[in-house]
Amino acid sequence: MTANVGGIDRILRIVAGLALIALAATGVVGAWGFLGAIPLATGVFRFCGAYTLLGINTCPMKAAEEEPAQ
């Protein structure tokens, strides 16, 4: 698994995941809120399977490595 989630994308995923889990734990939203574990995990591990399938990469380090040397 190579990193394909970077910077702001990573922070937003972690914050959104924690917010959903907190809302579910306090009973504000239903049990579906525990699905916040998915964006939380993708933010922590810096890998998103959907990004791989769609060919998206928001990690600047990986994008710089893929450029051919001149």
Image: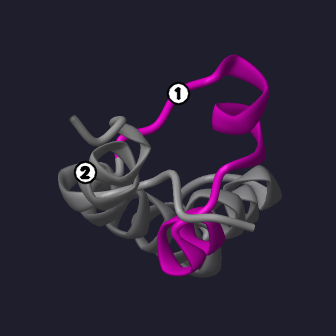
Measure the C-alpha gap from mark 1 to mark 2: 12 Å
Q: Decide: marks 1, 2 in contact (CB < 8 A)?
A: no
Q: How many marks?
A: 2
Q: Position of residue 53 (x, y in %)?
A: 79, 27
Residue 8 circle label: none
In x, y percent, where is residue 59? 35, 52
10 Å neighbourhood of mark 2: few (<14), some, or many (≥20)?
Answer: few
Q: Amino acid at mark 2?
A: Pro
Q: Position of residue 12 (x, y in %)?
A: 29, 55
Q: Which residue is mark 1?
A: 56
**Residue at the far front in the pictured view:** 70
The residue located at (62%, 80%) in the rendering is: 25
Residue behind mark 2: 60
Task: Let me know if residue 2 is in the magenta part.
Answer: no
Quadrant (top left/top right/bottom left/bottom right) for the C terminus:
top left
Stretch of the chain drawn in magenta:
40-58
Where's the N terminus, which quadrant?
Answer: bottom right
